[in-house]
Image (tube, rainbow, N blue to C red):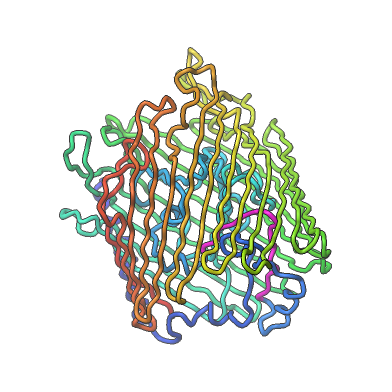
Amino acid sequence: MKKIKKSLKQIFFTLVICFSGVLGAEQLAGEPLGEGVADKTAASEVPVEGRSEGGLGSEGETSPTQSEKITESKLPHLYTYLDSPVVEQREVFTSDEIEKMHVPDLPSLFQASGMQILSYGSYGLEQKPSIRGFTDETVRVIVDGICVNNPQYGTFDFTSLNVNDIEKIEIVRGGFTESVSGEGAVAGVIYIQTKKQSLGHNFSSDVFARTFFNQALPLDGLGTAFGYDGEFSQNTFFKVRVKACEAQNRYFYKNYRGKSVEREHSDVYDGNISSSLSHYFGNGNSWTLSDIAYAGYKNTPNKANSKAWGLQEDYNNNLSFNMFLPKLLNVCKFTVSSTWLCSNRFYQENAQGFEEASKHFLNSGLLSSEADFYGSKHFRGNAGFSFNVEALDSTNDGKHILLSGLLKASPKVIFNRNFSMSLPLAFKFSGENTAFVPKVGFSANFSDLKYFPLEILLCGYRMIQFPIMDDLYWADSGYACGNPDLKPEEGWGAELTFNLKNKILPLSVAFYTNYYEQKIQWANDGVKWTPMNVASAFYAGLDASFKQTFFRILTIRGNFEYLYNQLLDESNPYTYKKRIMWTPDIVASLVAHLELSFVNLSLEANYTGKRYTSNSNLYAVEPYWLLNAGAEFTLWKYARPYVRVENLLDKEYVSVPDYPMPGISFTFGVKCKW
């Protein structure tokens, strides 16, 4: 029966892929590729929220006067006021940059940005970004202004998002954030903005296949994506995108005996559909109703030397309504969002047959609002709130309702053309836990200097992370039990950033330090395992990044992160003054794009340093280099074939100890637009 079910799924995915390819062939008429949305909206030159590229200065700031000019353009309904942080740093990836890389999922993109990724396997399996030695719930993920970290276990499944549906990604490193949506970050924030609207009627498709050069399975993965976006009327826009993938993830690796074996029980079948309806009315005002649905059927392998494996089914939905008023009373930009997040997970673990099963139903209601004030020459700021209701019904945690929320104000004072200050203040609560979170930042901008343009940013901030629901409510199983009396994790951080804005090589260097305490860890109290506020640690390091285009055809982006940390729990002599497990000393990346008349070439190099497998620092995982390459051929108007090679040097490596990663893989596909 299982074989029949698996065969039916394979047939279904194959039919979907074939249908998309046939449809694309029949519709190849109309506008050439590259003359779609971007060219049509170029007349209005719509700005987007956030900092200028790489966060290097305030070139991205838009004054109200500039915004009014936009409203007088030919397309007044495509109008957005740009909110410019005073101190907060953001690294930006646009949709064009993402598309040229042809990454299979977002974690591959994050790795190219110099971020450590804790990967438990290939496509569809758990992959967690780590920033400055923090991961899980401390890395906040914001999709279209809504925090999507799962309150039960803290993380977010990036596979549930369609890479082709991403308009822009902004990465903030560290705990200093000025917006309401970004509040709560300890390690940093990943802002993801999906595509909303475009003019005319536009269709797109992407058909691709992947191989690990396994002779028994020549094509390991197949996938297809199809999208439409366009106008319902002059001021109303609709978008829908569908994606389906099948990945067997049957690659070879060397086991502890040095024998080459095939990875088993790691096949993934998943798909998602995203849609949005946007309407613009009067002076750039708009509302958007959007939905992102995801379904995944995943076999989750255990460690390489284990025979156990699991079957995981995920069914998620994100339904939201947003109202956007960019010139409310000519003094502020106002947004309000109402969201329903649904996350359902079914899990079965197989050791000697299916022995343990669990079900998890999580429904979240979120209401948030934020106002950005820009009416004064010397004063700007934003203020807002968010309120969340989490309803959990879980085999492991039981039934619980958790209320959480925050109030935040971030006044920003512009003293003159060179000096400014930001003072974000937030009050947060989650269940019975409350916290006051102050932050302060200063900016000295000397970008007008002729020979040495420079911006200096200095900030300090408090960090607060409330316990996740698994830690609070895990039911007593005889050997483990949650702890409803957990306190928030907390700490203090500071950063000093130098943004060198020379034309030859713009460079940003940030020095940071953090002290973090009350860290929640599962420990044995003599009877059973339970989470406790026991750990404290010291962090220090630096981030460096640059991006430059040479001769208009070659773009190079680089990132470097050095991290030193030390555990400070004197009560445990085995871990005192030792490094925190799984945190590398160095993470670095270098990405190059070469655009020629007939082909676009890309090359990525990623380095992850030594990581200890436990806090006692007895054993370490060796550093590794990964080299990826890609090519996109632009000879045809409507279709662009592409190839991507990952792990070009066929390196044997692990991201998480005992979870082997793939060797070389080859992906080929065709993207069409008409």
What residue lies at 58% left-to-right and 46% top-to-bottom? Answer: 511
632 in the magenta segment: no
Outermost residue to the front: 451
- x, y percentage for residue 331? 82, 65
Q: Quadrant of residue 289?
A: bottom right
Q: Quadrant of residue 264?
A: top left
85 in the magenta segment: yes
- x, y percentage for residue 287? 68, 66
Outermost residue to the top: 526
34 or 568: nearer the eye?
A: 568
What secondary structure is the stretch in magenta mostly built from?
A: loop
What residue lies at 35% left-to-right and 53% top-to-bottom? Answer: 269
587 or 340: nearer the eye?
A: 587
State the count of labels.
Answer: 0
What residue lies at 59% left-to-right and 57% top-to-bottom? Answer: 90
- x, y percentage for residue 167? 53, 66
Q: Is residue 361 visible?
A: no
Q: Is residue 542 visible?
A: yes
| Quadrant holding the C terminus | bottom left
Residues in magenta, as a range: 78-93
